[in-house]
């Protein structure tokens, strides 16, 4: 089974943005920036879409 870490980070980011917007009415997309930084770190560490799970 392959794990798409970028897709997972993006999905979590989107979910957090939806919850944040609903509960506190803030839509600054902080979690999206965190997800992008996390994906860059994963790539720098050699964790990518081709790694087996």
Image (tube, helix red, strand yellow):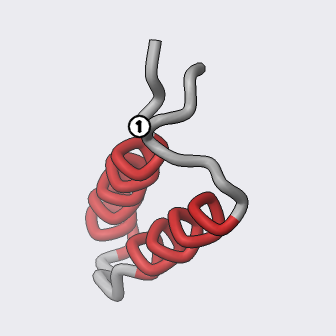
Q: Position of residue 35 (x, y in %)?
A: 48, 66
Q: Nearer the viewer, residue 33 or 51?
A: 51
Q: Nearer the viewer, residue 51 or 6?
A: 51
- Looking at the rendered structure, the number of numbered marks drawn on it comes to 1
Q: Is residue 48 left or right of residue 24?
A: right
The residue under the point 59% across, 20% down is 53
Q: Position of residue 9 (x, y in %)?
A: 45, 52
Q: Is residue 3 left or right of residue 43?
A: left
Q: Is residue 36 above or below residue 14?
A: below
| Residue at numbered disc 1 | 4
Q: Position of residue 37 (x, y in %)?
A: 55, 76
Q: Position of residue 27 (x, y in %)?
A: 29, 82
Label 1: how many residues lie within 10 Å, few (<14), some (14-19) or many (20+)?
A: some
Label 1 SS: loop
Q: Is residue 34 left or right of residue 18?
A: right
The residue under the point 45% across, 80% down is 33
Q: Is residue 50 above or below residue 37?
A: above
Q: Quadrant of residue 30?
A: bottom left
């Amino acid at each position: 089974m392959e794990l798409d870490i970028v897709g997972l980070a993006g999905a979590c980011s989107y979910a957090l943005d939806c919850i944040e917007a609903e509960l506190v009415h803030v839509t600054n997309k902080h979690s999206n920036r965190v997800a992008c930084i996390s994906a860059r770190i994963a790539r720098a560490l050699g964790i990518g879409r081709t790694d087996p799970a």
